[in-house]
Image (cartoon, grey):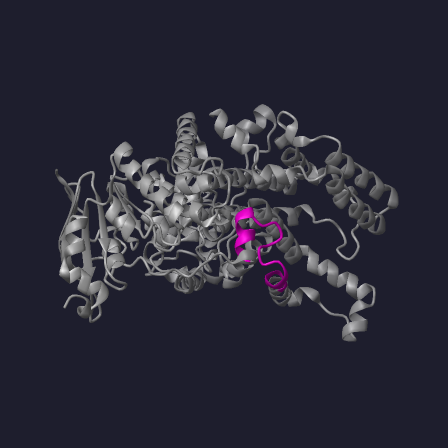
Amino acid sequence: MAPGIQAVRDSTPALKRQTMPRAKRAAIVGIPAFFVLAVTGSASLGLIVAVLIFGGLYIPAWNTLPLGKWIVPLGVILLAVLYPLYQPNLFDVVVFGNFPSIDTGVTMMIFIMMALGLNIVVGYAGLLDLGYVAFYAMGAYTVAWFASQHFSNVNVHVGGVGVAPDTPGFHISIWLVLIIAGVFATLAGILIGFPTLRLRGDYLAIVTLGFGEIMPQIASNGDNLFGHNITNGPQGINPIDPPGFGNTLHNAVGLPSDYLSSTSSTRLFYWTALFLVLVTVFCTVRLRDSRLGRAWIAIREDETAAAAMGVPLMRTKTWAYAAGAFFGGVAGAYYGSFKGGTFPGDFYFNISIFILCMVILGGMGNVWGVIVGAAFLSYLNQEGLANIGAWMNANGVSDFVFRKNIDVPLYTSGIFGVILVLTMLFRPEGLIPSSRRKAEFHEGVHDEPLYDVTHE
Amino acid sequence: MADLLTAVGVRKEFGGLVAVNDVDFTIPERTIVSLIGPNGAGKTTFFNMLTGVYKPTAGQIVFDGHDVTGKPPHAITQRGIGRTFQNIRLFQSMTSLENVLVGMHSRLKGGVLRAVIKPPSLKREEIAAREKAHDLLEFCGLRGRDDEYARNLAYGDQRRLEVARALGTEPKLLLLDEPTAGMNPQETAEFTAFVSKLREEEGLTVLMIEHDMRVVMGISERVTVLDYGEKISEGTPQEVQRDERVIEAYLGTAAVS
């Protein structure tokens, strides 16, 4: 890089932000951490953690160290990888109760993957997709077709594990099926995208909403589609083969031949999900920083100007759709394999909105924000609300407010609605917004287009 | 001199309104041509047809030996027509450098897979592209503004960035839509010199819509006047200035008689 560019880089806003006094930053995180932990768990543990956080943020100037920028992400990854090992020993958090179980962890990872996929479509390219669940369903049914006994008139085995060699149906290794599912979902994305992406804004949202409604209908009525049983209707398709490494690797290096036969199957599912999330994060970050990523943001900002700068609108938008769909497909396939079955009830419209909420709450366009949003909401959905409800009932809060015990998870949709409304009122850019988005919401730089790119 | 762009009988109707009425128009290579006319004369509509934003109702536009009539904007940009907008339309939440990089979109390669794998060749391309964008910003008088968000730039700098972004598309023909609107006389003079420099140093052909007659008469070789969607005059600045129909269009019939 030329020295001139380097000199300019040194005065970027990003670097200025990082030189915010380290002590202040460390105190902001460390001191509340102490109080939260001291109140909820034991004071000594709280103190230790708080000192660690304070020290970790204050002492080294991470950004000046060689490889310094990797220290924080690596620390987070390490914490995530080791989570199943230390989770049973963790203390209870007040109101929220236990830390999420490993099972919940897997579901959270799957939702993180989907939210990251949707973030490409909504956050980067600015295309409001209300039917993202269609790709999730596509992935889940792909794994159901290629790793179960559903097509019992064939007998194809390609690296399938956990099934006898003479079991009828397609039994393809889950690892391969994850990729196939991604590709199928991508194709579905291109197919859906082609007619719909000509539309703008609200119209696109309405059409995608339609597709999101059509998919579960096809799924639950697909047991007799033109005389073929494609989806096995409302009963769904199960069992689905588990992932695994096969007998050869099992005997050679001791890797589990299939997850279900292992004694720590949940942990294996967790680590695999974590690996998939890391791959997704890697891909989305790479895409964001590429030529294509720039084109997506340009389209989101101003379609007319983007087209005038040589960005082919249809193709670029379709790629956003396809890339987003890919990760939705992989997530769906992994979900099917994890649950051991694919059921049409899992793909209703509310899931699309649920994932969209994650993206909005976390911060559209920001990978880290979306991860936080997805983890938090899917945790609430899986465990959090039940825990909060239990705490409220046990401590007389429900009795005091509602005059009776209440079943909080019943009100999940309503609670998410309230969360969404509160986000929009108080922090429309999300919890961890991208620097681009933040300014848009606060300065309102978005102007109405003066004229449309139309080809009538 | 060969003609870089030829428009024959170009017409645009919006419902019953004829915005551009069978205009014939040519731009010789390496010239600066101005398109003038009173407000609502159809100048911007004509511009938008050249760049593919609108599809002409009738007529043909040939650019650099290729028929580009009704082609989508990105295809026309790829052929070598770069443009700026009358109302600045930068990508506000992107930095100056990123704005120019978007302009270079059609000159760079790399789809989804290549972006994810990021082979060394892509890394080299990306570095070269950034350096080129940096140079372009400097050329347009935006030294040291690379990482500044477009929305934070001063008005004059935003205009300059629009030109830098258009130059990023590596155009043969640069279309400027009222580039000096809102500039003070000093800035206007600088900008005029800059446009001449573009032609002399980069060999660009320039077509601009302009209201400031000092700019128009100062640097253009040829001036075309539109009024109510029709071409009413064409020629050197001196010829056009003397043309009665032009004076009439601008000042009304009384001024002539």
Q: Quadrant of residue B206?
A: top left
Does the magenta stretch mainly form a helix, a strand or a loop? helix
Tell me where the magenta segment starts and ends, as one range.
A422-441
B145 in relation to A214, above or below: above
Q: Quadrant of the C terminus of chain B?
A: bottom left
Q: Quadrant of the N terminus of chain B?
A: top left
Residue A195, how many percent across, how many down? 32, 57
Residue A351, how many percent across, how many down? 53, 59
Residue A37, how many percent across, how many down? 81, 47
| Residue A306 left/right relative to B146 | left
| Residue B50 left/right relative to A148 | left
Residue A359, visible in the rendered structure: yes
Q: Nearer the viewer, residue A105 or A232?
A: A105
Residue A254, how many percent across, how many down? 61, 27
| Residue A97 left/right relative to A192 | right
| Residue A167 left/right relative to A305 | right
Residue A187, visible in the rendered structure: no
